[in-house]
Image (cartoon, rainbow, N blue to C red):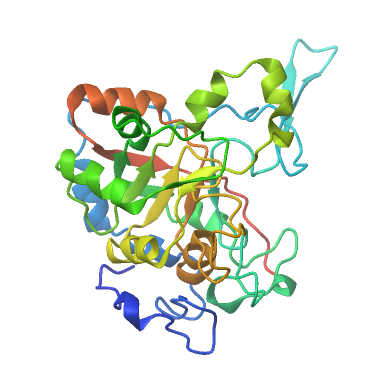
Amino acid sequence: MSSRPLPSFDELPLDKSGPPGNAWGLWGKNDELGMLNRITPATVTAAASEIKEGVRVSLDWPLDKPSFPAFDRQRFQHEILNKAPMTMNDDAIYINTQSSTQWDGFRHYGYQGAKMFYNGYGQADFKSGTGPLGINVFAQKGGITGRGVLLDWYTWAKRNNIRLSPFQTGAVELPHLKSIIAENDITLRPADILFIRIGFTAEYNALSLEQKEAFPDRKPGGLLGLEATRESLQWLWENQFAAIASDAAGFERGPATGSYNDPDVSIHQWCLAGWGLPLGELFDLEELAEQCQERKRWTFFLQSMPLKVCYRAS
């Protein structure tokens, strides 16, 4: 792991034979941690100083949310397995890992034109039960641990009469985030873990059962999220985040392949496939926002452990 300075944004792509914006080889040709390499013992120790009161907040949305997933993804299933004649039960659950609170790993989304994933891997390199680029690597290194920073765009937008539905395509603009940072006197540090609250989980929880059932087929569709522009990507790169996350279902404005996006400029492509920057989605930021607002303090110690499945050697 290293806290060394990053190359400038204008130096990207590092692998000139690869797709736009890539930082392949920055941490070595076989690296599977990407920007999580920025999490060092020193950054974790510094993040621990954020603990002042010992208040604990869960950021996990329930596993059965969204109740009716989009994109034909499997719904959450739970079984109670009675071990009769013993007075004993086991529980079994079945999920699609794109349900509920999640970290997108580096083989989730690649460069769509080049058909390549982080550090140049292709689909043929991935087989069930084996690596490379499994999210288990994050867990084996102690999870995503460090100083979290919350930018509460949802509250800021309402205060500034910006009304955008989290269930329709729309852009959280970079100047909005810069305003939130300035107004709350937030200082960003290398290896921070960024959270942007856009109000998705709050508004989804308020839907009726009928509205939740109709959610995958809603008209108009799309998702609210950070605008995918070169300026946004440069800001993410230059702030040297270790990971970025949101309560949004896609982090960036969706669909990422919409006509409003340059096909070569999307956050999923550049961050996941280009830089190895984990994207978190559907985090439950409601209580966190309340606690931060009460204290007027927007930084905190974070520990997030992805699912750990130890793949056998290929």
In this orientation, which residue lies closer to the viewer: 184 or 25?
Answer: 184
- Please tell me which residue is depicted at 33% across the width and 80% down the height of the picture: 10
Position of residue 256 measured from the top left corner of the image (x, y, whole percent): 58, 56
Position of residue 114 measured from the top left corner of the image (x, y, whole percent): 64, 78
Residue lying furthest front: 161
- Please tell me which residue is depicted at 79% across the width and 13% down the height of the picture: 86
Q: Is residue 140 left or right of residue 308?
A: left
Q: Is residue 20 above or below residue 279?
A: below
Q: Is residue 227 above or below residue 82?
A: below
Q: Is residue 313 above or below residue 184?
A: below
Position of residue 296 measured from the top left corner of the image (x, y, whole percent): 18, 29
Residue lying furthest left: 185
Q: Is residue 104 above or below residue 29?
A: above
- Please tell me which residue is depicted at 54% across the width and 67% down the height of the picture: 262
Residue lying furthest bottom: 17
Position of residue 25 measured from the top left corner of the image (x, y, whole percent): 45, 81
One can see residue 56 in this view: no
Q: Quadrant of the C terminus?
A: bottom right
Q: Quadrant of the N terminus?
A: bottom left
Q: Is residue 257 left or right of residue 77?
A: left
In this orientation, which residue lies closer to the viewer: 274 or 31?
Answer: 274
- Please tell me which residue is depicted at 62% across the width and 68% down the height of the picture: 132
